[in-house]
């Protein structure tokens, strides 16, 4: 009941846009916008759709919405996403998340972060995940055109797996390395790698990498091609430890 209510709430949020989601680690680095001081609010939506015909008909569609607010040294980020997969009009798989993040700039190259996330993924047998985290973000590169960041955080995680039959409460470290660079005038490359081990057992970890090529069609429309890979050393029973995906979609700036 609780999971279905959460799904319905996400559907209401997501009517404006879309972004594909397949994994347990949510990459937010490619969703941070370049700050424009004269514009405190920024809204972006993503759309994705695919249809595959072989032995089965596989229909995949989803939506995503990103809200950002800046004021002085403070910023807020909200990310919402939901994805549906239908196979032969019979099998129905869904996944979605909501991510909230607060940032405060402490120094020129040092930022404090606090975040909350709610997530479900039927394909990976993740019934519900809630996490709360806090940490620091370091800017390693001085070049504004080629930003490189390192993030180090602590997070508390609540997991319901296999339709709520397994419940875990964990304390994890979360670190990431992100890079953005311009390959050509209208082509950007983003790369982010996450590493999330248990505080008391580094053999229990998640590793994620995502690489994006973004082609600017015009000022408000972009083509996003991404390759993602995730390894979870303690994946839910029946779910794969290693997952990967190659995806294409449109990003619309409202």
Image (cartoon, rainbow, N blue to C red):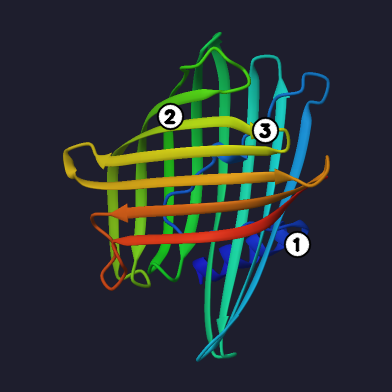
Residue for point 29% across, 50% down: 169
For residue 144, what is the image quadrant?
A: top right
Q: Which residue is mark 3?
A: 33
Per the image, label 1 sits on a secondary structure element best described as helix
Binning the other alpha carbons within 10 Å of mark 1 as few (below 14), some (14 to 19) or many (20 upward) gives some
- Circle nearer the N terminus (1, 3): 1
Binning the other alpha carbons within 10 Å of mark 2 as few (below 14), some (14 to 19) or many (20 upward) gives some
Q: Which residue is mark 1?
A: 15
Between 137 and 247, the one nearer to me in the picture: 247
Q: Which mark is residue 241?
A: none
Q: Is residue 86 visible?
A: yes
Marks 2/3: CA distance?
Answer: 21 Å
Question: Residue 48 location, x and y as percent?
Answer: 67, 63
Residue 245 vs 132, above or below: the answer is: below
Question: Is 40 on the left-hand or right-hand side of 72?
Answer: right
Per the image, label 2 sits on a secondary structure element best described as strand
Question: Is 52 on the left-hand or right-hand side of 47?
Answer: left
């Amino acid at each position: 009941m609780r999971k279905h209510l959460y799904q319905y709430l996400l559907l209401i949020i997501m009517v404006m846009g879309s972004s594909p989601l397949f994994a347990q680690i949510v990459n937010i680095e490619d969703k941070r916008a370049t700050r424009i001081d004269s514009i405190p609010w920024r809204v972006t939506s993503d759309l994705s759709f695919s249809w595959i015909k072989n032995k089965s008909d596989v229909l995949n569609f989803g939506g995503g919405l990103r809200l950002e607010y800046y004021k002085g040294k403070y910023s807020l980020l909200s990310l919402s996403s939901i994805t549906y997969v239908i196979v032969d009009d019979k099998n129905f798989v869904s996944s979605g998340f909501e991510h909230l993040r607060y940032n405060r700039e402490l120094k020129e190259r040092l930022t404090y972060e606090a975040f909350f996330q709610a997530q479900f993924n039927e394909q990976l047998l993740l019934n519900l995940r809630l996490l709360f985290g806090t940490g620091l973000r370091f800017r390693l590169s001085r070049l504004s055109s080629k930003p490189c960041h390192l993030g180090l955080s602590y997070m508390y995680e609540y997991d319901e797996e296999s339709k709520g039959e397994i419940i875990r409460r964990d304390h994890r470290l979360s670190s990431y390395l992100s890079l953005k660079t311009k390959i050509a005038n209208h082509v950007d490359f983003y790369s982010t790698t996450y590493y999330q081990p248990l505080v008391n057992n580094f053999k229990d970890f998640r590793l994620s990498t995502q690489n994006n090529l973004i082609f600017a069609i015009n000022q408000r429309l972009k083509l996003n091609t991404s390759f993602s890979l995730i390894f979870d050393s303690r994946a839910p029973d029946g779910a794969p430890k290693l997952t990967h995906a190659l995806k294409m979609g449109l990003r619309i700036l409202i």
